Image: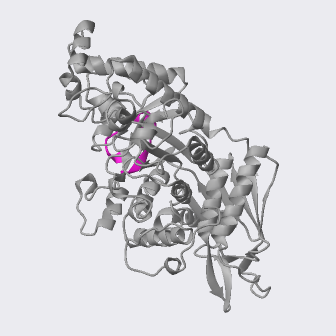
Amino acid sequence: MRLILSLVLLLAVTVFARSRRSQLRRTLDNRVNIWPHPSAVETLGNSAAVVKDNASFKITLKVPISPTEDDILQDAFNRFKEITFYEKLEAVPQTICQRDVVCVESVVFDIKSSAPSLSDSLGSHNESYSITIKEENTIYVSAPTIWGGLHALETLSQMIQIESRSEVQVYSFVGFTIPLKIVDSPRFSWRGLLVDTSRHYISVPKMRQIIDSLTYIKMNVLHWHIVDSDSFPVFIPDYPELSGKGAYSTKAIYTQQDVESLVDYAYRRGVNIVFEFDMPGHTVSWGAGIPEIMAKCPSLEPIMNPTVDKTYEVIDAVFAYVKKVTKNSYIHIGGDEIATQCWKADKQIQQWMKQKGYSSVDELLSYFERRVLDLLKKHSLSANVWEEVLLNYNQSVVQLPKDTVVTAWTTIDKLPKIIKAGYPSILSAGWYLDQQNPNNVHHYSWVDTWISFYNIEPYSIANFTQEEKKLLIGGEACMWGEAVDDINFDSRVFPRVLAVAERLWSKEEMKQVDGITRNRINHHRCNMVRRGVQAGPVSSGYCDASYTFKKMSWQ
């Protein structure tokens, strides 16, 4: 008899374990309409869940947190309610709240510890969270920091949709059964979008909306390519002539108040702004205001003159400005597409090199980079650079500190070269939103380039060791500004950038492009339209929000 009972018990445990594994496999086999897809979705029941009353829905904290963090979360709670409960519905009749339907009335947040400042920990702060919905009227959210709490709110907002029950419109957790638990965290810590405001000025209100859009897809870095050869649209107090003569118009200049307000706006949403001031190339607009810092090469596009002290005085003022307005320690200093032929064509530069005993432009570039890096150290800033500085020049001459973050942008095969050299790296190659054929893959329909973006798996580019994988800290999609401004930015970027967001957040196994993926991206595209993002569709279908478009009240 004991043997029979033991066998029965063993069989029951086995069946339960298989059932549980089956539920946990939902992450891959039964993907849910959350973008980017969570790490794990566990469902162990068959009950449905609806919001009892959207008008009185409560969000509270289990334990008090610091006033600053509390203020950030309270703002987020208010945004959540406007985004999620976009129509005022009547309270759910009690007849619906039966045994198989859970009527949810509140969310309780348990923030485990005081969050480290994003400024101290960009690329390493804890963004994980869990959501538990039991057969009761309260949802429980747990997160180590408020940054994970913000992501939990975004996930909850995507889970709740309007549907009809017993001929009554209700806010329901469509596609989910209760009890349910979501456990989620990002795969990569640096998940960004490059926005170029030199080729075309992007207005401050539009920049705010772009920041909001990043939070809807759990991206946490806005790489602000603020200046380039085309224009210098930012006011630098010590050198007002830079924007005074380098900007397109007096209406196309970011004041210090503009910049500081955007940095704070982003920070409160868990997004860090990393400024890029490309140098020594891509600097024609600098010369419009201060011509003496530029090399003289009439038949070529001029670049900075590394041999005059004035160049470094201006760079020093720019770094001091960045240090004042930023909330993190990173600045991108470019280093790509350096037309060193300009230095060879400048007689004064050639004479200076001869006096110094320099025989190559690599030595001149090394001199420039050393002085620039010394200025970064002076202002306690860390460098990001494009791949050329590491890969295109003699590294016995041009030596980068090992904490320099290097971005692979030309082709994906540059990424393993950067990592093999021992540098922290970011992948952008293959994720250029302005390209017709990203990663050399042709699509009949331009919008289908999102498939190419989705198919790039960073860890599959090379046979990385576990230690080498640690050097790959994330990636960025890039929207260069030659053909976008306020009018068409959204439709060019969204929803295609969603593919990059999911690749950087979700598990490596989440890489199947099929009808389910296409339906999911269309679904979240419609969510974004409802939130004021003019995102275009990726295939045929219907989105009611496209015909009732409005911006959020805080934008």
Residue 445 in the figure: left or right of residue 97: left
Res 267 visible: yes
Residue 496 in the figure: left or right of residue 111: left
Residue 66, position as x, y percentages in the image: 78, 43
Residue 195, position as x, y percentages in the image: 43, 50
Q: Nearer the viewer, residue 192 or 274?
A: 274
Res 466 visible: no
Q: Nearer the viewer, residue 518 or 359?
A: 359
Residue 465 magenta: yes
Q: How is the image coloured?
A: one colour
Residue 21, position as x, y percentages in the image: 55, 62
The part of the chain drawn in magenta is 460-480
Residue 483 magenta: no
- Tell me where residue 167 sits by quadrant: bottom right
Q: Nearer the viewer, residue 312 or 1?
A: 312
Quadrant of the image containing the N terminus: bottom right
Identify the residue at horizontal 51%, vertical 66% (top origin). Answer: 533
Residue 441 in the figure: left or right of residue 159: left
Identify the residue at horizontal 52%, vertical 67% (top origin). Answer: 528
Q: Is residue 1 above or below residue 548?
A: above
- Tell me where residue 237 sits by quadrant: top right
Q: Is residue 318 above or below residue 490?
A: above
Q: Is residue 95 above or below residue 284?
A: below
Residue 297, position as x, y percentages in the image: 21, 29
Identify the residue at horizontal 54%, vertical 24% (top origin). Answer: 379
Quadrant of the image containing the C terminus: bottom right
